[in-house]
Amino acid sequence: MYMIYCVSSTIATVYCVGVIMDRLDETDERILAELAEHARATFAEIGQRVNLSAPAVKRRVDRMLDNGVIRGFTTVVDRNALGWTTEAYVQVFCHGTIAPDELRAAWHVLARDMRHLEEALERIRSSADIERSESIVVLSNIIERRP
């Protein structure tokens, strides 16, 4: 049977992919939901919620990792809490031709303040291949996007 599981949380995101796996059962689904809702929970805590021992939960999570059902875990950091309050999108224009693996036409830049942003823009523009850049500074975020 072909199943696609995509589970996410506001604290951490569990990235999943569609995988041909005939052994994903209701308990696995509950474990995925628990990971999404309580990403920092121990295997013992998850086990209590899904009626399994901690080692059994670990075996199932390891199996889902090995089979590609769970692709990884992400920590979402509040950049404002760290003082990174300035944000900009920078488009760069290069001289001549450039190899595809070296091409990066747009940058999303986070900085502490405008001075720090200017320093970051100077580092971007200091590349010999950059002809010019255009920046759009974000004044406020209307929508909070999750990774």
Image (cartoon, rainbow, N blue to C red):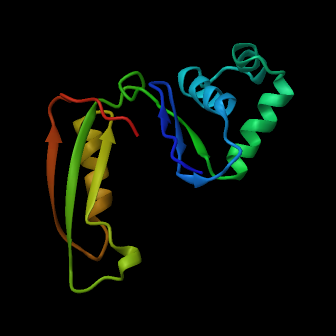
Above/below status of 17 relative to 76: below
- Which residue is drawn at the image coordinates 82% and 23% (left, top)? 54
Above/below status of 123 relative to 78: below
- Which residue is drawn at the image coordinates 64% and 23% (left, top)? 40
Farthest-out residue, front = 1
Residue 42, image x and y in percent?
73, 21
Relative depth, front residue between 16 and 21: 21
Relative depth, front residue between 31 and 142: 31
Quarter-wise, where is residue 72 in the image?
top right
Q: Quadrant of the C terminus?
A: top left
Relative depth, front residue between 142 and 44: 44
Relative depth, front residue between 35 and 145: 35
Residue 43, image x and y in percent?
76, 24
- Which residue is drawn at the image coordinates 35% and 31% (left, top)? 84
Determine whether, in the image, residue 43 is placed left or right of residue 7.
right
Residue 117, image x and y in percent?
26, 43
Q: How many marks?
A: 0
Above/below status of 34 relative to 25: above
Residue 105, image x and y in percent?
26, 66
Quarter-wise, where is residue 133 in the image?
bottom left
